[in-house]
Amino acid sequence: MTAYAVAHLRSVDQNAEIVDYLRRIDATLDPFEGRFVVHGVLPEVLEGDWPGVLVVIGFPDLATARAWYDSPAYQEILPLRTRNSDGVTLLVDGVPEGYRAAAFAEKLVSGG
């Protein structure tokens, strides 16, 4: 099941370190089959407040996403981003093909 690394970056200092990070991140993703799904876009906010930009990277599964994040190659460049941005980063499982929210509602109703 596809998993995602998601970052909500409320602010980013567009400087030489961020440029270096951007130039190097693709090489860290390749061994883990990571691919950008959304990168640095301002979303169209329909409800509530959303300061900043969104980044979503897809991976084959959660274990692979975690292996990428923990990899020496990514850990080497991570400070280039964290020193120059403010935000939240998380890993999350996607849903299986054919997922229906109604099935989840039934679990809630049945207590399962």
Image: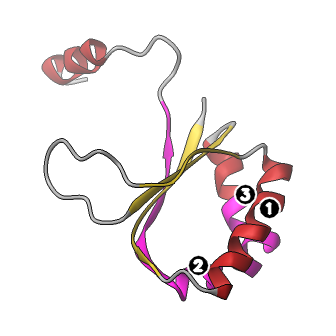
Q: For this view, does 44 lie left or right of residue 99? A: left
Q: Residue 81: which numbered mark, if any?
A: 2
The mark that comes first in sequence, 3 or 1, is 1
Q: Write the residue at 26% across / 23% down.
A: 112
The reply to whether residue 71 is in sight is no
Q: Residue 28: which numbered mark, if any?
A: 1
- Marks 2,3: beta carbons within 8 A: no
The mark that comes first in sequence, 2 or 3, is 3
- Marks 1,2: beta carbons within 8 A: no
Q: Nearer the viewer, mark 3 or mark 1?
A: 1
Q: For this view, does 50 lie left or right of residue 4? A: left
Q: Dot 3 corresponds to which residue? A: 67
Q: For this view, does 16 lie left or right of residue 107? A: right
From mark 1 to mark 2, how far is it between C-alphas? 14 Å
Residue 100 quadrant? top left
Q: Nearer the viewer, residue 111 or 15?
A: 15
From mark 2 to mark 3, how far is it between C-alphas? 18 Å
From mark 3 to mark 1, how far is it between C-alphas? 11 Å
Residue 107 painted magenta: no
Q: Residue 99: which numbered mark, if any?
A: none
The reply to whether residue 98 is in sight is yes
Q: Amino acid at mark 1?
A: Thr
Please tell me whether mark 1 sits on a helix, a strand or a loop: helix
Check disc 1: other Cα within 10 Å, few if <14, some if 14-19, many if 20+.
some
Range of residues picked out in magenta: 68-94
